[in-house]
Structure formats: C-alpha cells, structure tokens
Amino acid sequence: MIKQWFKSGSPWVWLNAAAVSICLIFVIGLLSLVTIKGAGHFWPSDVAEIVYQEEGGQPETIVGEIVDTSITGAAMAKASGYKMADNEDTLVQDLIKTGNRDVLGADFRWIQERNIQSQQFPADISVLERREWGNLYGDLVAVKESGNIVATGDQALPVAQERIETALAIFGEITRIEKKEIGAVNYGLERLRLKQKRLQMDGQWNQEAQQQIAAEKAEYDADYKRYQDQLGELYKQIRRDSLVVKTSGGSELEVPLAKVVRLYQPNAMSVGDKIIHYGSKLAEFLTDSPREANTEGGIFPAIFGTIMMVIIMSIIVTPFGVIAAVYLREYAKQGFMTRLIRIAVNNLAGVPSVVYGVFGLGFFVYILGGNIDRLFYPESAPAPVFGTPGLLWASITLALLTLPVVIVSTEEGLARIPKSIREGSLALGATKLETLWRTVLPMASPAMMTGLILAVARAAGEVAPLMLVGVVKLAPSLPLDGNFPFLHLDRKFMHLGFHIYDVGFQSPNVEAARPLVYATSLLLVIVIVGLNLAAIKIRNHLREKYRALEG
C-alpha cells in the first residue's frame, strides 16, 4: 500500500507543498515582524513615572518610556549574578528609555520589576525632541525670551508650542540659505578657482581673464556677504527663546528653541492627537535629513540616492543586456563559442556581489576614473573628480552585476517567438533588421521587462559592492541639485541598504537605533515592491499590446 503510494508520486507533491508553505510562513513572518516593529516606531508611547528602589539603596524616580520587557529563568538569573529568592521562578526586567543623555549619560536603563515601588503616568510629563542629545523627559516649567520668563504653569505649553512653530520656520529658512544659496555660492567659487587654474595651466591667464574672474568673484563675495547678514539676523531670532524643563532628578535645564524639534505630552494626548503625531513623525522620516549620527530624523537622502542609482543602473543595463541577447540569439552562429559565452554569462550571475565591488573599485574608480581625471580634469588635481567612488561608478558596477539577468531573460523571450513570424515578415519584403526592430523586439519586450524587474530588485537590495564604489554614511549634498550640470555623477550618495547596516551595526547607540532599523527595512521593502509593481504593470501592458501578434 505504502509502496504504491510512493509510486503514485503523491509524497513528492505533498513535500513540495510543505516546502512552499514553510517558505511562505517564513516570508510572511519576516514581513510581519518588520511591519509591526517599523510602523510602530512612530507611535507616541506613554511616559511612565516610576519610583524605584534597589536592594539596600535609596528610592529614586525614573521617568521614561517602557520599550521592552525581559523574562529570565531563576537559574539563569542566579548564574548571571542576580540574587533570587526561593519563591521566585523568574526575573522580570523592563527596558526604560530614560532619555536625558546629557544628564544621565545614557538613553536606556534596565530595571527589575520586583524593585518598582510605584508606577504612574502623569498627564503633564513633557517629551522634548532635540536636535542633539536625544529626547528630554520632564516637566515644562517656563518659557523664556531673551532670558526673561514670559510664561509659566498652564500657560507655558501653548506659548512654547507657538514659539516652537516660529523657531522651526526660522530653522527651515536657515537650512535653505546655508544649503541652497550659500552652497551655490561656494560651488560657483570652486568652479571659478578651477577655471583660473585651468587658464594658468594652458598659458591663457592674461589681464582680460584676470579681470573677468575678479568680477565674477566679486559678485559671489557680495552674495555671500548678503546671505551671511541674513543668517546673522535669523540666528539672532532663533536663539532668543528657550524652554526651562525640570528633570526627574529635580534639576532644571534651559534648552534653546534652536535645538528643539518637537514638544508634546503623550500621556495627555487623545487617539486623534496621537494619529496626527504619527503622521507628522512619518512625514519627517520620509522627507527630512538624518540627525544624531543617523539614529534620529529622516532618511530622505538615502531614499533619493537609492532611487537615483536604480534609475541610472536601469538606463545602463537595459540596452547592453538587450543588444547582447539579440546578438547571441539572432546573429551569432550557434556553436561551441556561443555555448561557452552563455555558460560564462550564467556563471557571472553566481559571482559574489562583493567581487563586483572590488572590480568596480579597481577598474572603474582607480583606472577609468583616474584616467578621466588626468585627461579632462587636470586642474582639480590632487583632488579627484571621477577618480573616487561615486554615483556613476556605483550604477555601472550594479549594471554589470545585473547584466546576466537581463541577457538571460531577454534571450528566453526571443526564443519563445515562433519562427513563422520572422519568416512571414521576411516573406513580405522586410529586411532582417526591420523584422527585428518592428516585430521581434516588441514581442519580446515583456521578457525584457521581466529581466529589468529582477535586475532592479537585486540592485536595490545590494549593499556589499556599494560600500566600495560610492555609498557613504552621510552625504553632504544630493547628487541632483540646481547647480550646473545639475546631475553630479561624481558625488557620493546615501543608500537605504547601507543605512540599515550602518544604523544597526555601526551606531554607538544601538538601542536607540533599533526601531529605525525596522522602519528603514520596511521602507526598503516598500521601495523594491513599488519599483517591481511599476515594472510589472509596464510588462503586462506590453504583453496585452502584442498578444494579437502571438496569436
């Protein structure tokens, strides 16, 4: 009976179904974990006020968010050095985000639940998000203007909120002037310096050139002085106000509004207020620049860098992959050499990605980029232009990495087109090139899009090669801006995958960075899924368009 059952093939069907089910469970579980942890990062947690007393110590008040709970068995707790009573089976510990790093020296602290004397959630506890030193937890005491108190008690919070909004608007204007206006002036001055050096190297540095350079430099200097005056006035306004906050230890801290991002009282917030707060934090995460060594703020530069690199990579890899596949399928003589090339292409897909990074660094950056600098940018020496990792070399390296995928997919698409279609086109008088361009390639376009989808999915998630050819922890400017030539392929850029690695494994404050790792991972998955869905939609449109020809 069992022998017949094995011979029927049913066990292998059940085995395959079980394997697929296990894979689906793993994928769904992983995505669920990332979604829950990542999406929950932006929800405002209640802040607890805990009276805590360790054995033999004095009672102390701890204020913070309960972010995690650990349960340890009695035997393991004893082995770790904890004193356990005979009737205790487990040791329960809570991880408290206490903030106030400039006061306490750390953002997080583990406490034992058995030592908690009391715990409450007062409505008037404030959370102050700062640009430096992380969150500050405490009671808002007063609002000061030029050192003089202007509001205290119940009036302090609305006055503080109003002035924070004003300070944020001023901070935004300061950021715009520093990054856009003064950045453009500095960029123009650097171009003038290189232009002067180039004229001197070419022996064309005469009086007329000197006067022209001097006139342009005088304009930049005048603009720079005007922007500095504006900045001076804005800094004077933003440094005028400050907040006084009383911490759990009883000390009072004065925080300038220039360093404040947000003030809120989570214990007093309704569900609607928390949803609005959640939306505000999510918008900041998607559109703002990172703070505090990438552990706070947004990740917009990483999103922008990832999408820019994928687009440039797609522009490079698609024509090369399609041309190679068309040659191998339509023009190359099918023989030993063609089979050898196909084997080589297939094997390239299995090469570890870091090997591509080493190759990109050695060939593209040092050899190709170094020669481009010597030929076209000698005035920039010794500073490299293209002889250093950047967006262009990262895109080309990933295009090389994903090239086998596009070639194989396109070639399979070309192979599926019936021979009768080619012969019919030739019989009607079309040349081979016209048949290829007007009939074969359009019908194979869904397969090309499939190859591009797979290439985009792999390129967006790669990190190892990018660490060698262009990705950095913090990029001072985006590769696309308003300065000529607008798209700066020589600039380094930020990437979501490397951002996850950096925040998760290189951050000095691991506990603070952990929620951001989940949130960034969730966003990377969404970006990849979005790029794939867009490509799938285009592929399906092409498939429907040329379905009539296949029939």
Image: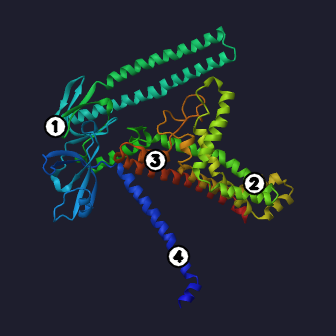
Q: Residues within 10 Å of mark 4 (few under 14, many from 20)?
A: few
The residue beneath circle 3 is: 501
Task: Indicate the secondary structure of the residue bearing disc 3.
Answer: helix
C-alpha separation, residue under disc 2 versus residue under disc 1: 75 Å
Q: Give the residue type that dot 1 points to.
A: Gly
Q: Residues within 10 Å of mark 2 (few under 14, many from 20)?
A: some
Q: Give the residue type that dot 3 points to.
A: Tyr
Residue occupying the point 41% across, 60% down? 32
The residue beneath circle 2 is: 326
Q: Give the residue type that dot 4 points to.
A: Leu
Which one is closest to the eye, mark 4 or mark 3?
A: 3
Residue occupying the point 61% across, 25% down? 381
Percent from the top left, x then y, of residue 311?
A: 59, 45
The reply to whether residue 76 is in sight is yes
Disc nearer the start of the sequence (2/3): 2
The residue beneath circle 4 is: 15
Disc nearer the start of the sequence (2/4): 4
The C terminus lies in quadrant: bottom right
